[in-house]
């Protein structure tokens, strides 16, 4: 749970939730601690491969009178 993970990393459960929901990027020391805890390279957990690609939006055309 977020509480248990937060306890292991010495952060609030809200911090874990914010990282999971991509509303917060962890500091480098926290990112390294998370990667170490899960036994994964930090690049795999937080690198470009881990980030969802941005969807291109279609520009809105506006008529200017």
Image (spheres, helix red, strand yellow):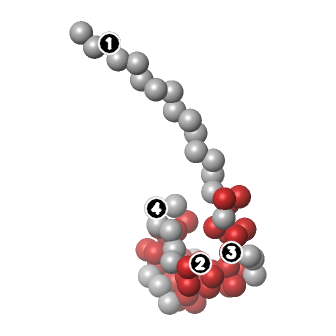
Of marks 4 and 1, the one in the foreground: 1
Question: Which callout, 4 or 1, points at the residue further toward the start of the chain?
Answer: 4
Measure the C-alpha gap from mark 3 to mark 1: 47 Å
Q: Residue furthest front?
A: 64
Residue at the spot of label 3: 42
Residue 31: numbered disc: 2
Residue 48 x %, y %: 66, 59
Question: Which callout, 1 or 2, points at the residue further toward the start of the chain?
Answer: 2
Task: Give the image quarter of residue 34.
Answer: bottom right
Helix, strand or loop status at disc 4: loop
Residue 3: numbered disc: none
CB atoms of marks 2 and 3 within 8 Å: yes
Measure the C-alpha gap from mark 2 to mark 3: 7 Å
Residue 63: numbered disc: 1
Measure the C-alpha gap from mark 4 to mark 3: 18 Å
Question: Which callout, 4 or 3, points at the residue further toward the start of the chain?
Answer: 4
Mark 2, other Cα within 10 Å: few <14 / some 14–19 / many ≥20: some
Helix, strand or loop status at disc 3: helix
Mark 4, other Cα within 10 Å: few <14 / some 14–19 / many ≥20: few
Measure the C-alpha gap from mark 4 to mark 1: 35 Å
Residue 23: numbered disc: 4
Residue 57 x %, y %: 51, 32
Measure the C-alpha gap from mark 1 to mark 2: 47 Å
Q: Which quadrant: the C terminus? A: top left
């Amino acid at each position: 749970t977020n509480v248990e993970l937060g306890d292991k990393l010495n952060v609030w459960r809200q911090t874990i939730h914010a990282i999971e929901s991509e509303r917060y990027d962890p500091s480098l020391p926290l990112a390294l601690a998370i990667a170490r805890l899960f036994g994964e390279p930090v690049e795999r957990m937080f690198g470009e491969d881990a980030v969802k690609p941005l969807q291109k939006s279609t520009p809105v055309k506006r008529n200017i009178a």
